[in-house]
Amino acid sequence: MDIGKLFRDAWGLFVKDIGPLIVGMLIASIVPAVAAVVIFFATFAASISGLQVDSQGTVTGMDSLNWALIGIGSVAIVLVTLFLSVPLYVGILSGVFRRVREGREMAYGDAFTGFGMFGKVIWAAVLLGLVITAVFVVPTAVIVGGAAAGSGILAGLGVVVLLAAMVAYIYLLIVWVYVFPVIVDRGLGVTQAMGESRRLVHGTGWWWTFLVLFLLQLVVGAVSFALGMIPFIGAIASIVLYPFVLTYVVAMYFQARSEGQLIDAVLGWPRQAPAGPPAYSAPAAPYSTAPLPPAPPYVAPAAGPPPAVDQGQAYAPAPPPLTPPARSAYEAQEAAPAAPQTAVTQPVAPEAPAQPATPEAPPAPEPPASSL
């Protein structure tokens, strides 16, 4: 991943729709908080209204109804916060995706579009929460059980399992970082989105994904600490950081899918060539830019005596000059120019006189037939 491009794209998307992003984040933060406060006063305040404390500090007036109200209130706060905050955050994420995919300007009401995917996003949040909770509940139960049984070996094994659970927790957080973006962008189911998120993370590189998220936490933590130095205003101003975190995750998602050019087109960045090894090109032959020296003038070789011949060296005499072979008389006659022929007039013999026609002799009479 290009870390510099991630921060640049995230900031560009944040500034592009800064108004709807901040308003949507305020809605996603305030609405669940107000609902939780209302439930708290409706349950906890009612449950402790009949409590009494005597002079010895003993609390009285707590019955089963009070404990039921406290339990119901705790569960209601968790569910209401989950059912309101997750769809609102997903709606803001959906608005950023529409800006990139469709080029549509984000609206102030986009924060509520997440309720159209209520079933998927709630089931995804519940399933991820159960898996992450189970990762820590199992080793914790082993540690507590070993301590209660007085078994040092079992407690030590639980510590080892807890350390392994922490590693698994970090691994799963990184692997499933794209679950909600995949659901919003491709409309996949929860388990399919979990598998696709894992494929994208490992396609980019788990350590690379961990590094870019770690840098994000460092930047957000430093800015939040600086704003926290300002009383009251700093706490409110830190809410602005959360939309930037969403746009950062969106920029990571498009880079993982090799679709970073879509963000470039939306933000008007110059299009970059796809990452990869450069094409091989043969090195150019070295050459000099100095002018060539002028050619020397042609000098004919001087005539001199023939080279001396070594008397002891055998050599063949020069062949006689070629003469055309003798031709036969027939070939000479054929090659000689033809003599002009003179037309010869032959005397014509006189024609003989015509002979008179000879009369034909009469036919001889037939002999008479003999009579018997």
Image: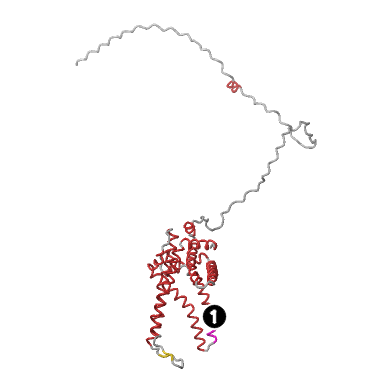
Q: In the image, is residue 84 above or below residue 280?
A: below
The amino acid beneath tag 1 is Val
Which color mode does the image show?
secondary structure
Q: In the image, is residue 239 above or below residue 58?
A: above
View extreme (right): residue: 311
Q: In this rendering, would 80 be left or right of 299? A: left
**Residue 68 position within the rendered picture, expressed as x and y whole percent measured from the top left:** 38, 84
Q: For the C terminus, which image quadrant? A: top left
Q: Is residue 126 visible?
A: no
Q: Which residues are magenta?
A: 152-161
Q: Main secondary structure of the magenta part?
A: helix
From the image, tell me which residue sits under label 1. Answer: 160
Mark 1 element type: helix
Residue 94 colored magenta? no
Q: In the image, is residue 346 above or below residue 218?
A: above
**Residue 208 position within the rendered picture, expressed as x and y whole percent measured from the top left:** 54, 66
Front position in the image: 341 or 260: 260
**Residue 67 position within the rendered picture, expressed as x and y whole percent measured from the top left:** 40, 85
Q: In this rendering, would 156 be left or right of 302? A: left
Q: In this rendering, would 84 be left or right of 274? A: left
Residue 157 colored magenta? yes
Front position in the image: 298 or 111: 111
Residue at 52%, 64% in the rendered image: 204
**Residue 314 position within the rendered picture, expressed as x and y whole percent measured from the top left:** 76, 36
Front position in the image: 14 or 270: 14
Residue at 41%, 7% in the rendered image: 352
The answer to which image quadrant residue 348 occupies is top left
